[in-house]
Every structure is written in C-alpha cells, then in structure tokens.
Amino acid sequence: MAAKLRGSRLEAEVDRARADGNWKRLSELLHAMKSKHSGMDDMVELVEAELELETFLEQQGEVLRPRSDYANELREAEMLLKDTIDRRSGATTLEAHLLLAKLHYASAAYSEALKDIENSGMELANTQFRTLRALRLVAEVYAIKVISTA
C-alpha cells in the first residue's frame, strides 16, 4: 500500500506515523519516500535517521540510560542527520539538529547535545514548528537540555 501513496497523501501518512511514534509504519513508508516521484526528497535522510534512532532507543527499554558505547551503534543515523543539516534548510534542518541532540544525549555526549540544541535555533522567537513531531522533539530536547546542564 505504501508504494501507491504519492505527494500530499504520502506526506500526511509520514507525518501521522512520525507523530504517533509508529516506527513500523514509517519503515514501510520509507520505501515510497525514496521513489523518484514522491515529492519528499528533502525528508528521506531525516526520516531514515529518525527511524534508526527511535528504533534503537525503543530496543533499550522504557528508561533511557545514556551510554557512550551507543555512539558506534548510532553512527549511521548520525551521518544521515549531519548530511541533512549540510544539504537542507528550514524545518528539516531544525528537526535534524533536534534529533542529533537526542542521539548525542543517548550516547552520553552531553556537550555535543547542548551544541546541537544551540545550533537548532529552536529558542528563537521566529522558529516555526511544521509538525506535531517537531513540537514533541522540542519538548524532549528541552528535557535533554535541563538534564545535560544539571
């Protein structure tokens, strides 16, 4: 079914899966996103990295206990997020910075997480949050900021 979705329908399905934290559904939609005519080329790397990160974190259990050895397991997601930041602008970059902060926090790289938060620009008055998922990421990142500075 995911292969038949295109354009705004595909984008709506992706946004819904991301907002609901339905990573299984998002993995199904990722293939359709990668097709040439999906209209979501700017989101593919971000969604792929988010899927890797969130799936990994779910496997670690209910309570996240940051560990430096997670960095090796999350290397691919980190590279995808950095590529997204280097190539894109706007809301995609904001979300990439927020996900990178979450990844660095999970990897016990607290100073890196704080740099990612600062680089995101989420605290600027003109920041617009395009999706419910972006708002949830901001809430998570504020918690990460408090924990990382304590």
Image (tube, helix red, strand yellow):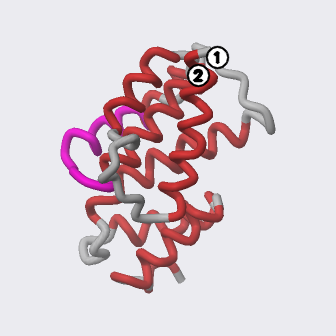
Along the viewing direction, whichever of 145 and 63 lies nearer the viewer: 145
Q: Quadrant of residue 120?
A: top left
Horizontal relation, residue 56 to residue 37: left or right: right
Label 1 with label 2: CB-CB less than 8 Å? yes
The stretch in magenta equals: 77-92
User: Per the image, is 80 magenta?
Assistant: yes
Alpha carbons under labels 1 and 2: distance apart: 6 Å
Mark 1: which amino acid? Arg
Of residues 34 and 41, which is closer to you in this image?
Answer: 41
The residue singled out by tag 2 in the image is 70
Where is residue 63? Give x, y as percent.
78, 32
Determine the residue positioned at 51% across, 31% down: 103
Label 2 CA crowd tier, 10 Å (few <14, some 14–19, many 20+)? some
Position of residue 12 in the picture relative to residue 25 (left or right): left
- Coordinates of residue 12 in the picture (x, y in percent): 47, 78
Label 1 sits on a secondary structure element that is: loop
Q: x, y percentage for residue 115?
A: 38, 23
Figure check: 119 above or below 71: below
Residue 41 versus residue 39 in the image, above or below:
above
Residue 52, which numbered label? Answer: none
Q: Which residue is mark 1?
A: 67
Q: Quadrant of residue 10?
A: bottom left
Per the image, label 2 sits on a secondary structure element best described as: helix
For the residue carrying disc 1, how many other residues have a C-alpha within 10 Å: few (<14), some (14-19), or many (20+)? few
Residue type highlighted by circle 2: Tyr
Q: Quadrant of the C terminus?
A: top right
